[in-house]
Image (tube, grey):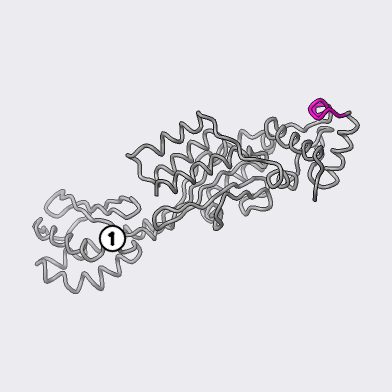
């Protein structure tokens, strides 16, 4: 489908006006902008409606963009918006904060974008089971109690209280931790228990006297730790209640409830994961999340891992601004990884 210049200009005005106001656009509002008669504008609007790019509403004689109209606008008319100095400064402050790990920086930057746009931000990381053990430390509490601290290569830190059946000298504990560190550092979390059983258990008696007590205590601690991490939800959400404030949903409590409830479904949220490079836009029925929303998302890479950042909002989204914001974050992730 190819539109002439006036039809393109008309569709651009209607889409961008509706994005700002959430109100149907009538012909009178456009006449001065395009220097045309009301009759001409009405004819052009009727043609765009015939093409499936505009829709009439039941409550007004004006038109609103259809799903197809948004798609045409995104593919043929829209240009990414330049970020304002204020938007850029807020994001630069996060990416220049050296005290934050990159994963935390990504999450915080998406939280800021959610606040700036009032859309829902999603950060989908790697499956937690892909975390590898980076270091193990212990903190003694008592003669038979200690805290085991496990740090992964992705900056995940967990601790477990360990209670041993007998009192064990600290030197024995230190040797055991040293042995475990030497053998399991670099091992994926979900493989630690197996490595303890088949590589640590056969030789631990050569290093420590109370090997049975120590092996059992550490095995149980790691087993619980691996189980908890593998069941963690590898995503973060911000602004899920923003849909309550969108005018097109304000009179439809069932629709809001349906959309918001989907954010509680791990499988549905995980389906947002992006496989393609670039910043991709899925309008209405094009996305697997919900027909009444748009999902704009992109894949990012951090060291050996990758994830997805996305914004979810009504089909009446500020497409040009969202693309610019996500592109800025994507570039900074690449620069800092």
Magenta segment's dominant SS is helix
**Residue 195 lies in what quarter of the image?**
bottom left
**x and y, in percent, of residue 220 in the image:** 26, 62
**Residue 126 lies in what quarter of the image?**
bottom left
What number of labels is visible?
Answer: 1
Nearest the viewer among 163 and 239 is 239
85 versus 137 height, above or below: above
In the image, which residues are magenta?
A: 28-36
Residue at the outermost top position? 32
Q: Which residue is drawn at 81% across and 45% down?
A: 3
**32 within the magenta span:** yes
Describe residue 309's horizontal placement relative to residue 61 as left or right.
Answer: left
**30 within the magenta span:** yes
**x and y, in percent, of residue 54 in the image:** 79, 42
Within 10 Å of disc 1 (Cα), the crowding (few <14, some 14-19, many 20+) is: many
Say what secondary structure mark 1 lies in: helix
79 versus 172 height, above or below: above
Circle 1 sits on which residue?
222
Residue at the outermost right position? 39
**x and y, in percent, of residue 121 in the image:** 52, 42
**x and y, in percent, of residue 114 in the image:** 52, 37
Q: Residue at x 65, y 45 (%)?
A: 293
101 versus 177 height, above or below: above
Residue at the outermost front position? 5
């Amino acid at each position: 489908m190819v539109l002439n210049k006036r039809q393109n200009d008309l569709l651009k005005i209607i889409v961008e006006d509706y994005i700002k106001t959430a109100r149907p656009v009538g012909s009178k509002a456009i006449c001065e902008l395009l220097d045309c008669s009301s009759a001409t504008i009405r004819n052009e609007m009727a043609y765009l409606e015939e093409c499936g790019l505009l829709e009439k509403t039941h409550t007004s004689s004006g038109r609103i963009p259809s799903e197809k109209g948004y798609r045409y606008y995104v593919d043929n008319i829209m240009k990414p918006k330049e970020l304002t100095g204020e938007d850029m400064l807020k994001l630069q402050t996060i990416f220049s904060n050296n005290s934050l790990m990159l994963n935390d920086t990504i999450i915080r930057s998406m939280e800021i974008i959610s606040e700036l746009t009032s859309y829902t931000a999603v950060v989908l990381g790697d499956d937690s089971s892909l975390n590898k053990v980076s270091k193990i430390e212990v903190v003694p509490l008592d003669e038979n109690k200690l805290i085991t601290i496990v740090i992964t290569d992705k900056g995940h830190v967990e601790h477990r209280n360990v209670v041993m059946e007998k009192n064990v000298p600290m030197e024995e504990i230190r040797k055991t931790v040293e042995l475990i560190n030497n053998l399991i550092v670099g091992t994926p979390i979900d493989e630690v228990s197996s490595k303890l059983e088949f590589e640590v258990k056969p030789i631990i008696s050569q290093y420590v006297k109370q090997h049975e007590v120590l092996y059992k205590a550490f095995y149980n601690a790691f087993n619980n730790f691996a189980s908890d991490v593998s069941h963690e939800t590898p995503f973060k959400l911000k602004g899920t209640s923003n849909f309550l404030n969108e005018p097109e949903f304000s009179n439809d409590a069932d629709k809001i409830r349906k959309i918001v409830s989907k954010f509680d479904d791990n499988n549905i949220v995980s389906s947002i994961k992006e496989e393609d490079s670039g910043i991709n836009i899925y309008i209405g029925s094009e996305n697997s999340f919900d027909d009444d929303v748009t999902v704009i998302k992109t894949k990012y890479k951090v060291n050996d891992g990758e994830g997805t950042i996305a914004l979810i909002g009504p089909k009446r989204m500020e497409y040009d601004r969202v693309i610019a914001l996500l592109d800025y974050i994507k570039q900074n992730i690449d620069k800092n990884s």
